[in-house]
Amino acid sequence: MTYSYSIGATRYGFADLRALLAKASPLRSGDVLAGLAAATAEERMAARLCLADLPLTTFLNEALIPYEADEVTRLIVDRHDATAFAELAHLTVGGFRDWLLAYEADAAVLARVAPGITPEMAAAVSKLMRNQDLIAVARKCRVVSAFRDTIGLPGRLAVRLQPNHPTDDARGIAASLLDGLLLGCGDAVIGINPASDKLSTFMQLWHMLDELIARFDIPTQSCVLTHVTSQIRGIEQGAPVDLVFQSIAGTEAANRSFGIDLALLGEARAAALSLGRGTVGDQVMYFETGQGSALSAGAHHGVDQQTCEARAYGVARAFSPLLVNSVVGFIGPEYLYDGKQITRAGLEDHFCGKLLGVPLGCDICYTNHAEADQDDMDNLLTLLGVAGVSYVMGVPGADDVMLNYQSTSFHDALYVREVLGLRHAPEFEAWLERMQILGPGGRVLDQPAAALLPLLDDLGRP
């Protein structure tokens, strides 16, 4: 079906729903690279005005990627909750924006309708919203998940402790672990991106993290961020796996480029659940996503990168994850050129994920060849904190020495918690107090917790 809209004497035509969504997107380098972006600001506005008048039911009748050709489309269509959608069925995309911003659309209402919202609907309405709209609505969404502690409660912000090392050196990892724990980080997950691709290295890391968590009775979870097939093999060989990690995307072809499909994700989830390692919950999956991943794999099917990203949240939603995060600026300036584009994308991703009922966090980051700097990351961290983001990254010095990109530091977490009055996950907060890491008012104490000081020697032996 074709779409059109006139501004003055100029009539703008859009070949199909994919083209309309792409032209309505805020400018970003990835859509320009793909040849999908609006040619002018006026064309972009015409697309948005046309999109605003579009009934939400259009997205149930016109697939961006054919049902027969894409298992992600099939997942989205087959799992759509018509009963939850009935409350929204009379709305246009523009009307949906107004409905979301109304006082009456509170946390309970948004949770009730979430199963009826498709990723494409979420992406479409985000294209009509200013940054403040994205923040205001996302802040109202409550998505709570749990494994050994509880993530996503109101007034709380969790942090992934990311102690990567370029050679997977145990002592170097232990030093970063100690630094992060003493600064109150690690309630989302202690997650290591290994430099090696050997199962023997992964096994050592799993056992190291398991020993740490057990010895100090830390109410958190561990993860070794390697390919899902390696994690299944690890479980088969007795690895103490808490969370299963995988990068995912919004099309079948893009997921195939990662070496996965939906059946494999289901197998991995079942394997992790069989271990029964959770204490306050059983959400065992950890997914990472990022705008531009489908385009970089040549697997976007002419769909703009932000809509592809929202479809990835549709995949995540089906597997009841503990954590999902957009690695928003990681793929590079070819997809998000500068700090402005990264900021906008981060707010879009957080909004779309939370609207769909996904426990979304954000790796607030950039690569060194992007037109961005740490001031841009400070801005996005603050905006996402206001928007109620579930968790962010904690990287020593904000500089990941293994992945070679810039993120947020342990001290950045201290900053955003202080200025916005945010607290840790409750179980982790209680542990920090027992360990005398947190003092009155939830602030990190100047004196290190003596009980953690043996960490370097005990866990960092060659």
Image: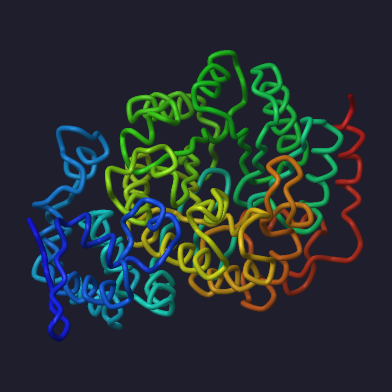
Please name whichever residue, 128 or 90, is drawn nearer the observer in this view of the structure.
Answer: 128
- The image position of residue 38, as x and y in percent, is 30, 66
281 relative to 7 in the view: left or right: right
Please name whichever residue, 147 or 82, is drawn nearer the observer in this view of the structure.
Answer: 82
Compared to 392, does 317 lie above or below?
above
The number of numbered discs placed on residues in the rendered structure image is 0
322 relative to 174 in the view: left or right: left
Please name whichever residue, 170 or 21, is drawn nearer the observer in this view of the structure.
Answer: 21
Check the image and name the residue furthest to the front. Answer: 9
Coloring scheme used: rainbow
Compared to 353, does 421 lie above or below?
below
Q: Quadrant of the C terminus?
A: top right
- The image position of residue 171, as x and y in percent, is 86, 34
Q: Residue at x 40, y 44 (%)?
A: 295
**Quadrant in which residue 92 is drawn:** bottom left
Please name whichever residue, 222 or 201, is drawn nearer the observer in this view of the structure.
Answer: 201
Q: Residue at x 12, y 56 (%)?
A: 83
Q: Residue at x 52, y 68 (%)?
A: 343
Q: Is residue 426 visible?
A: no
- The image position of residue 303, as x and y in percent, is 28, 50
- The image position of residue 228, as x and y in percent, is 50, 27
Check the image and name the residue furthest to the top. Answer: 237
